Image (cartoon, rainbow, N blue to C red):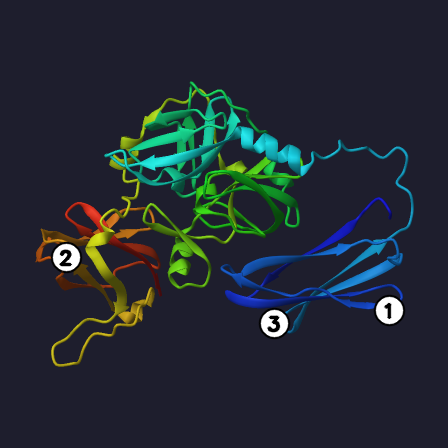
Amino acid sequence: MPDDRQVIVYFEWEASKGTHHCEGSLKGPNGQLAVMSSFDYPATQTKFGGFWTIPLLENTSAGIWTFESRVDGESAGELRFEIVSAKRPADAVKEEPLPSPAEIYARAVAASASIEKLDSRGQLIGGGSGVFLEDGLLVTTFRVIDGAQTLRIGLSDGSHLQSTEVVGWNRRQDWAILKLTAAKSAKLRKTDSATVTVGDHCYWLDTKPGGGRVISDGQIVGKEPHEGWGERYSISGLFNSSAVGGPVLSERGEVLGLLGGALPESLVRSVLRDSQSYSLGGTTFTMTGSVVPVGLIRSDASAGQTPLQTLWTAGQFTAPVTAERRVSFGMITQGKPQKGKGPLSREMKVDFTHQDEIATIVIAFQGIEAWKNTVQLRIHDADNHILSNGDPVKLSLRSGETQERIWSFPLAPMHPGVYRADVLVGDAVAWREYFRVRE
């Protein structure tokens, strides 16, 4: 002291999945005791972490301090640190002054872009944001472009471009790169992912309904590896769906990641309503403050362009929900309707085990106007592969009429994981739900 202004104490624990109550207490060199703020952490992995920030004030006592963490009422680790009242050595390396939030905001806005997804008719079906990291290369999350036929990009100078190609992508890691040769935009530097730690202060650009951008700030509150899907950061804040794909910035204004990073598990959690969620192109994602680390993105300015249609052909894209007006009600539940054994359970269930044996989907189709078409159920895995493609069934409704259709399917052949159920009217998706199968 007085050069340092705060101490950040960080713990990593190992426990069962689920919500854990985390508490901290601080004991000073003179025996003084302070109770730190507590929080509940919804652990999706058996290893998880948390941190506390301790401000250093003018009257903070010098000496050895002890911090104890408690999880679910049990002692879960102790850390000690020393506070010394002394001047920083004259030969200490002086760091460059950090940019102000206003400077970071101005740079980020100049290097950011809006991205709109258009269908084959040119209709808007979703969108998000992106950021320039190299000349002409706009990076965003894969979910922002997923299901598009054409992309319309709005630059910070008010101009607009259209693109039907990408130069790089990774569906599982959730990133994509667009090459815009006519774009003249500012660009931001990437930070070294190895230097990003829990407790780091960060900024991100959120969006307002009118399209304006606002700066938000918080901290990196977690880092979680997901086998086969790449690492994700968690930040201490939420953001609007139109901000997804935009930059998360360090204190120096360098990009450390992209807002987004949806995972299959989060899609099921949004159905379970244990966190806030948003809908993007008919697909629901949770807003848990998830971030795609910039270190996952592999850009190559010399790479060739790949048409979006190629991603459709390769099964990389997810068809958007565009015929939802044909459905008044839909749910997935356990069991199968059987004659003479009473009505089927109407309790929604999206978390199954193999002991459940059979799942059933119930859809009530509505005739806002009279229509005739076929209806069909498809089951996909987390990589968008079709696992089950039911036979189309003809359906005819009069105006104002409602008809119910039921599909049942076995759970035993399915490996543990997350799956997607789509109900189609003709070739258009009218209803979608994600569900999980465990051992």
The residue pinned by badge 1 equals: 31
Compared with 313, 265 (above or below) is: below
Q: Nearer the viewer, residue 250 or 45?
A: 250
C-beta proximity under 8 Å, tags 1 and 3: no
Q: Position of residue 194 (x, y in %)?
A: 62, 39
- The earlier-in-sequence mark between 1 and 3 is 1
The disc labelled 2 sits on which kind of residue? Gly
The residue pinned by badge 2 equals: 367
Q: Which corner quadrant of the image does residue 57 belong to?
A: bottom right
Compared with 411, 308 (above or below) is: above
The residue pinned by badge 3 equals: 72
**Element marked by disc 2:** loop
Q: Position of residue 251 (x, y in %)?
A: 66, 39
Left or right, 37 with respect to 188, comes to right
**Element marked by disc 1:** loop
- The earlier-in-sequence mark between 1 and 2 is 1
Distance from disc 1 to disc 2, alpha carbons, whole Å, reads 73 Å
Report if residue 116 is visible in the image.
Answer: yes
C-beta proximity under 8 Å, tags 2 and 3: no
The disc labelled 1 sits on which kind of residue? Gly
